Amino acid sequence: MKQDIDRLMEARGLDALIVTGPMGDNTPMKYLTGNAKLTGGLVVKVRDSAPVLIASDMEREEAAKSGLEVHTFSSLGYMELLQKYPGETLKAQVEFYGRIFNKFGIRGKVGFYGRGDPGTAYRLITALAAEYDYIEPVGEAEPTVFDAAYETKDADEIARLKDVGRRTCAVMGEALDFIKSHSARDGTIVKDDGSPLTIGDVKRFVRHRLLEYDLEDPLEMIFAQGRDAGVPHSHGEDDQPLRLGKSVIFDLFPRELGGGYFHDMTRTWCFGYAPDEVQEAYEQVMEISARIMAAYKVGEPASKYQIMAEEYFEERGHPTLHTNPRTREGYVHNLGHGVGLQVHESPRFSRHSVKSTLRIGNVFTIEPGLYYPDRGFGVRIEDTVYVDEDGKVVPITDFPKDLVIPLG
């Protein structure tokens, strides 16, 4: 949570942190500035002090909506520095940062975060270290101070995540109704004019409905059929017609329009009927999902639940990453991951997540699956859940898990 940042900085020996870059897909910037609609900026936080936002004069009113103390680049003299060093932006930036260090009393270890070109960032940070001997630039490996903060959500964040989940489920329901409104001919789902209903048709419908719910699809949904459903992150082929009896994995992970919190859910459908081997795989995925939901307990390592899933599938003859780290069939991924401003964040539920434990405020997915591309099918069921103040694991995803979907 945000309230943990000072504690996390102290644990890492950080005296200050600076977040830079454009706003788009800049999670630390979004995290600290909230709902402010900015193109970019710079956030400065000295440990045990409130963050300060430096933004363009053109965006000063949007910056104020962040609730942070706001300064502008021009008020701190950046424009004059660009004139002082024509064509030498790096020199202007180095002197500008010196002004920031002095104004906000920044000394000691300074962590740098955000988004931008790695080479440009390297040149700037190297120049800052050479110019100002009273700061020590620090770059963290995962988990960074922000990764650790994201791992638990406060009540406001969980409320937003619930709302995104509600809207996502509504869109998935409308997508299912759209497909069910069609008929089948010779094993293919067809439109009124007799032409095939394709995966691309479904995706276009879903994107349109997402916008109606103020959601967006920045990472592109998965709607994969048959063999493609057997490759976990195959997004499906837009020109492929929907066919009866083929497993379809529909993984929908939109976020709030304009950048914000994600939801992540998956359903597996067979239109008309399900082949026996798909039905069997589906029942096993459903069973282990229910067992793990009943077993979740605050304080237990995240690795415990991945091991539960692996052992369950191994007992039923499926390859897993434990029995064969290179397997491309069977149970080929980890059980789940955190969800927030990023669709994949901590906690992560792998066999190696021995240091990550279930905590109040966690929001994460549970998504066991079985994949057999050479046999032409895959099955995955995914819900997003959270751990409430009583330590209970509560689903956010509220949508039926029927495998066989009849057509009208």
Image (cartoon, grey):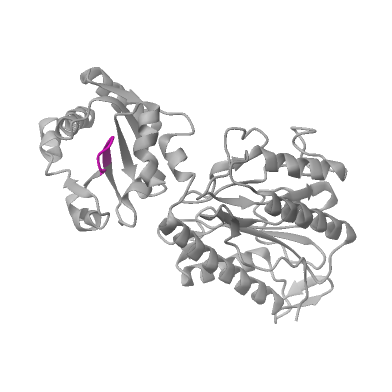
Q: Nearer the viewer, residue 85 or 5?
A: 5
Q: Nearer the viewer, residue 278 or 400?
A: 400
Position of 164 with respect to 39 (left or right) is: right
Is 46 inside the magenta-drawn segment? yes
Image label count:
0
Position of 201 with respect to 254 (left or right) is: right
Q: Residue furthest front?
A: 390
Which residue appears at 70% of the width and 71% of the height?
197
Quadrant, the C terminus: bottom right
Question: Which percent across, then down, holds residue 204?
Answer: 57, 67
Is 391 inside the magenta-drawn segment? no
Examine the rendering and report whether any part of residue 226 can be seen.
no
Question: Which percent across, then down, holds residue 77?
Answer: 11, 38
Examine the rendering and report whether any part of residue 263 can be seen.
yes
Which residue appears at 46% of the width and 39% of the height?
148
- Which span is picked out in magenta? 43-51
State the image quarter where residue 75 is shown: top left
Position of 45 with respect to 171 (left or right) is: left
Question: Which percent across, then down, holds residue 90?
Answer: 23, 29
